[in-house]
């Protein structure tokens, strides 16, 4: 599991946000498009791409895309 691939998968769930604007240090909850539907899309993407079941409370403890990557990676090890 690579951070670059995770960022690309993360960016793919957004329709209006440019993929070029999403980086490891992006605070994803501050993205303009971020809302409850995006949370569900993110959980679905993680399930499909990484076969991992997210605990929403634990996910909410992450702040940046890299934090989220590290959390998902911990679920797949």
Image (tube, helix red, strand yellow):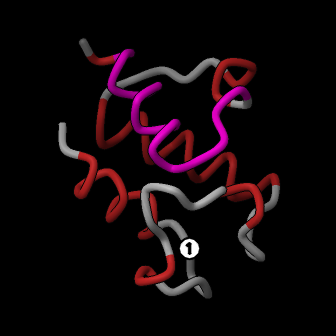
For label 1, the residue is 14
SS majority, magenta? helix
Relative height, residue 38 to residue 49 (above, below) = below
Q: Identify the residue at image location x=75%, y=19%.
A: 57
Q: Identify the residue at image location x=70%, y=25%.
A: 56
Relative height, residue 61 to residue 65 (above, below) = above
Residue 53 lies in magenta, yes or no? no
Quadrant of the rendered structure where residue 9 is?
bottom left
Q: Residue 64 or 49: which is nearer the viewer?
A: 64
Magenta stretch bounds: 61-75
Q: Which residue lies furthest to the left in this view?
A: 1
Report how many numbered discs are placed on residues in the image. Answer: 1
Residue 19 in picture, x, y percent from top left: 43, 80
58 left or right, relative to 30 = left
62 left or right, relative to 33 = left
65 left or right, relative to 77 = right
Residue 4 in picture, x, y percent from top left: 24, 57
Q: Identify the residue at image location x=50%, y=86%.
A: 18
Q: Identify the residue at image location x=47%, y=25%.
A: 71
Q: Residue 63 or 73: which is nearer the viewer?
A: 63
Residue 66 lies in magenta, yes or no? yes
What element does badge 1 sit on?
loop
How packed mark 1 is, by other alpha carbons closer than 10 Å (few <14, some 14-19, many 20 or more), is some
Residue 61 in picture, x, y percent from top left: 71, 26
Q: Residue furthest front?
A: 25
Q: Quick one: quadrant of the N terminus?
A: top left
Residue 27 in picture, x, y percent from top left: 65, 56
Q: Quick one: quadrant of the C terminus?
A: top left
């Amino acid at each position: 599991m690579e951070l670059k691939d995770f960022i690309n998968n993360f960016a793919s769930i957004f329709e209006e946000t440019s993929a070029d604007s999403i980086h490891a240090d992006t605070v994803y909850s501050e993205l303009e498009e971020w809302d409850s539907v995006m949370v569900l899309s993110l959980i679905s993407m993680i399930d499909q791409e990484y076969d991992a079941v997210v605990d929403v409370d634990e996910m909410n403890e992450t702040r940046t895309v890299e934090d989220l990557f590290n959390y998902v990676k911990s679920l797949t090890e």
